[in-house]
Amino acid sequence: MRLIFMGTPEFAVPTLAALVEAGFDIAAVYTRAPKPAGRRGLDLTPSPVEVFARGKGLPVVTPKSLRGSEAVAEFAGFGARLGVVVGYGLLLPPAILAAAPLGFLNLHPSLLPRWRGAAPIQRPIMAGDAETAAAIMRMEEGLDTGPTALVERVAIPRDATAGDMHDQLAAIGARLMVEAVRKIEAGALSFTPQAEEGVLYAQKIDKAEARIDWSAPAQAVHDKIRGLSPFPGAYFEHDFGRGPERVKVLRSQLGPGHGAPGTLLDDALSVACGDGAVRLVQIQRAGKAPMEASAFLRGTPLAAGLVLA
């Protein structure tokens, strides 16, 4: 099977690696162009997919757009029968979708049609969902509207973060994609239309929603913390003596106790919420590495009764 892979983030790398390991003929790897980096933006940082692909000696293509006859001709020139897409980040216009005889398979990490869109790993956790899924679907012009072929449900543990689920779903999705490509090559891959009910959209995470609202119920605070970990990271602010400093919370647990929202209930970073409390397990001060709460408190003791902003 000769195919073109299209992906950009770290989440896509396991699928590309699995396709390479399975021996498929990867004609080209499409990924987003390197991003400016450094203080002056003069350095260019290639995507995780580009780094992996070049390490395997695969041809890499980084177009700014796929619109126009030249882009379509270049794509068609690779002679691929199938396209595989995982978090590519560019819109695939109809002419590109029609350029692969067997169409395009997409890995989407949610229980479709729930959580279509940009943040399908984070939003289920933030909403307190008990499960999610890795789904292989056929791409259409609509946003994650195509029929599904392979779906594997995955439980979301009560304290799991987006980072935890990211790695698990990436591994499951890679395995499912290899299975799907083998089946479509054999003419044995069937598709099921998505349900018309239960559609939810996973809107892109806005950094403005990352600030912790201690007046929310403890479950909602806990779900926000784990849904936004490790990036962008839910945060609170506190003055440690040099003005307000942003502190990210990367892991938390539901805890006992109650009090005025934002109040420390003990000397172990248990914080009162609008209903109940959460215990901060892992945090990250600005410019510093993540650390366990116990290690943080050894250097910066915060006593019960203190109110966090």
Image (cartoon, helix red, strand yellow):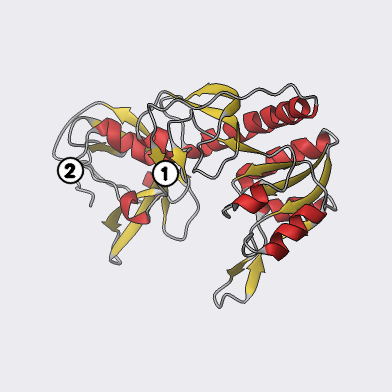
State whether residue 96 is above or below residue 23: below
Residue 251 visible: no
Residue labelled with disc 2:
305
Residue labelled with disc 1:
228
- Do tag 1 and tag 2 residues touch (Cβ < 8 Å)? no
CA–CA distance in space, label 1 to label 2? 27 Å
State whether residue 125 is above or below residue 231: above
- What residue do we see at 62% from left, 77% from top? 42
Q: Earlier in the sequence, mark 1 or mark 2?
A: 1
- What residue do we see at 35% from left, 40% from top? 224
Residue 142 visible: yes
Q: Nearer the viewer, mark 1 or mark 2?
A: 1
- Classify residue 285 as left or right of residue 173: left
- Classify residue 160 as left or right of residue 259: right
- What residue do we see at 69% from left, 32% from top? 177
What percent of the width, then of the height, locates residue 216? Answer: 21, 38
Q: Dot 2, crowdedness within 10 Å: few (<14), some or many (≥20)?
A: some
